[in-house]
């Protein structure tokens, strides 16, 4: 469960990072 949560958190962070680095 924690791995799944961590993966989702990573994708969310990557999305935000990508958005800010537009």
Image: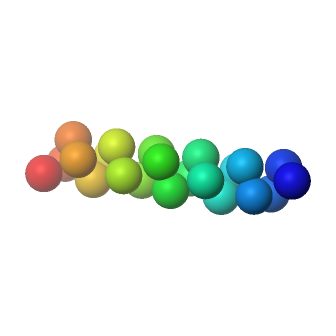
Residue 17 falls left or right of residue 7: left
- 15 up-or-down from 20: above or below: below
Expressed as whole percent of the image width and height from the top left, the position of residue 21 reads 19, 48
Q: Residue at x 70, y 50 (%)?
A: 6
**20 relative to 16 in the view: left or right:** left
Relative side of 7 to 1, left or right: left
Q: Give residue 14's position: percent from left, percent from top.
A: 42, 53
Task: Residue 12 in the image: state x and y as whole percent.
Answer: 47, 48
Q: How many numbered discs sit on the rendered protein?
A: 0
Residue furthest left as drawn: 22
At horizontal 61% and vertical 53% (from top left) the residue drawn is: 8
Residue furthest right in the image: 1
Q: Is residue 15 left or right of residue 10?
A: left
Residue in front for this viewpoint, 6 or 21: 6
Chosen colour scheme? rainbow
Residue shown at 65% from the left, 58% from the top: 7
Q: Residue at x 72, y 49 (%)?
A: 5
């Amino acid at each position: 469960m924690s791995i799944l949560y961590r993966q989702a958190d990573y994708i969310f962070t990557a999305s935000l990072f990508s958005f800010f680095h537009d």
